[in-house]
Amino acid sequence: MARRTLEADGERWVVYPSGRTTQYDRDEFGLVFEKGTGPARVRRVTRYSPVGARRWDAALAELTDAHLLELLRQSQPAWTSPEAEYARSSR
């Protein structure tokens, strides 16, 4: 699975596609932002519409760090999202 790392406010986030398909198929992808491990792990989820490539791995690779940071800032907690199966605890 394609992964990227992002530094935001001095913290390291790992970014990867959620793998969940929406009705928009290749026009919209879910992204999971994750920091930490175990019980201290924090996960946030967002969706984005790629402008160039339509394959999720290529679309993720095309995103700039600035765009990823913007997506992180507008993301929602994992427990509010079907992409993370509404999970409140780490898995």
Image (cartoon, rainbow, N blue to C red):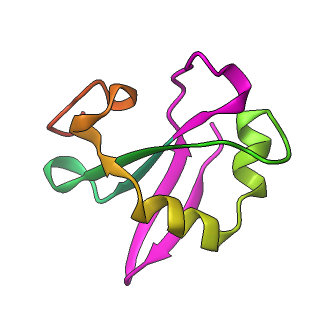
Q: Is residue 54 magenta?
A: no
x and y, in percent, of residue 52 in the image: 85, 47
Q: Which residue is rendered at x = 16% and y = 56% of the image?
A: 40
Judging depth in this view, the residue of 54 and 2 nearest the camera is 54
Q: Quadrant of residue 84?
A: top left
Labels in figure, total? 0
Compared with 42, 18 (above or below) is above
Locate the N terminus by quadrant. top right
Q: Which residues are magenta?
A: 1-30
Q: Which residue is rendered at x = 52% and y = 69% of the image?
A: 69
x and y, in percent, of residue 73 in the image: 41, 65
Locate the C terminus by quadrant. top left
Q: Which residue is rendered at x = 54% and y = 45% of the image?
A: 16
x and y, in percent, of residue 64 in the image: 70, 67
Position of 13 compared to 3: left or right? left
Judging depth in this view, the residue of 37 and 33 nearest the camera is 33
Position of 7 compared to 84: left or right? right
Q: Quadrant of residue 35?
A: bottom left
Compared with 65, 71 (above or below) is above
Judging depth in this view, the residue of 84 and 24 nearest the camera is 24
Residue at the outermost top position? 23
Q: Is residue 15 magenta?
A: yes
Residue at the outermost right position? 52
x and y, in percent, of residue 22 in the image: 55, 20
Residue at the outermost bottom position? 10
Q: Which residue is rendered at x = 64% and y = 22% of the image?
A: 24
Q: Quadrant of residue 21?
A: top right
